[in-house]
Amino acid sequence: MQIDKYKIDEFNNSLLKEHKRRFDFAAEGITGLDCILKKLVDFQIAIPSWALGTGGTRFGRFSGGGEPRTLEEKIEDVGLLHSLNKSGGAISLHIPWDIPQDAKAIKALAAQHGLRFDAVNSNTFQDQPDQKHSYKFGSLQHVDKATRKQAIDHNIDVIKQGVELGSDSITVWLSDGSCFPGQLNFRKAFQRTLESLQEIYAALPNNWKMFVEYKAFEPNFYSMTVGDWGQSLLYASKLGPKAYTLVDLGHHLPNANIEQIVALLLSEGKLGGFHFNDSKYGDDDLTVGSINPYQLFLIFNELVEGMDARGMQHATDLGWMIDASHNVKDPLEDLLQSVEAIKIAYAQALLVDTKALQAAQEASDVARAQEILQQAYRTDVRALVAEARLQAGAALQPLQLYRQLKVRDNLIKERGQKTVATGL
């Protein structure tokens, strides 16, 4: 399904008067407004192909109908989202769930929807039907050399797939670890994993990046071979200048200071990008900003300050991607909400008076520093984000238009009520 531009224009015209009133009020007194709006227009968040279907728990999955059955339909759904908000201009594929049968045709289809291909993702956390060796006891860390070779070859094949599509990075997430004490020799597991990653790293094209993702727990509950940001940083540092740490907001133990982690990785030049989501208890993969929007803002505050200090481009020098699971929501509605939350937190961070904050920090004026941050966080920037969408040719209120056009009903008519997205 595609949304005609005239429908977006008609919808915007019906809201324009009220939007102008809200925008004029929000914009008053903001320094560098045009620059902020330009940054908001340019800032794009990649949509992962696996987030376009209904998620699930260990106990059940309840499809909402109309899910994309093919890679082509997944691209169409991301294109639909992008037409509504002009902020999701990239799709991230998971191989082998999304192997293109005709890479040239798939690349052309994506271009028709104004999309590029973000990081490609390897999968050695599942056994595939035609797989010779099992990953039950690990992949790149496995004690069996043949199993490690199989996992290495898969990652190299993912790189080749990405090259054909125009991607320039690979995300490696390992479920490798152990469930019980004594199951694994930690030192040997680390060394085997490093040697495997080195072979994959050697296959990277010159302009590519490798993102090493970490997770404190799950699916293994005694140890994870890449269990925290320190271990990821250690791997990335040993691999070389094309290797970076990737931060998934849900991949931390409770109450972790993620903003401090981000600041330190950025300072070391080893922050590669993000998987955005939110959580209450663990790796819940909830809608971005639905549980702790203040933490999201604090993370973006560190990003904006740190990237500016290093002369980095906000929109392109890091990888920005959503990684969420929508167990009881329409996945497309959830993704629209997530993108909106990210843009709001980014806009708030752009409003922080950095010079005043640094002066308060240097003077150890704790109360003043807190007030400066919270002043930006408590500013209602929704009209600024909406204005950026309007300037980009998107809908002023994407979720409202999505429902008004009955997009999910139309997708169910096209694809059926019982469709299940591939890869889930």
Image (cartoon, helix red, strand yellow):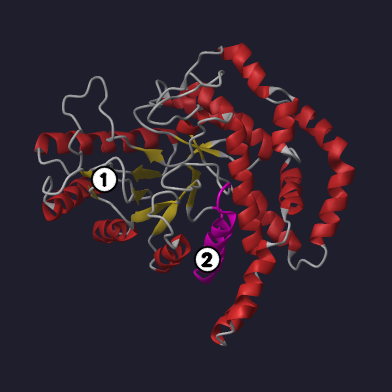
Residue 353 visible at all: no
**Disc on the earlier residue, 2 or 1:** 1
Total numbered labels placed on residues in the image: 2
Q: Quadrant of residue 85?
A: top right
Q: In the image, which residues are magenta?
A: 290-315
Under mark 2, the amino acid is: Glu
Residue linked to disc 1: 221
Please say whether residue 27 is one of the residues in the magenta stretch. no
Residue linked to disc 2: 302
Counting from the top left corner in percent of width and height, residue 208 is at 37, 48
Real-space Cα distance between discs 2 and 1?
31 Å
Counting from the top left corner in percent of width and height, residue 7 is at 78, 28
Between 133 and 55, the one nearer to me in the picture: 55
Q: Quadrant of residue 293?
A: bottom right
Q: Quadrant of the C terminus?
A: top left
Instruction: Assign a secondary structure to mark 1.
Output: loop
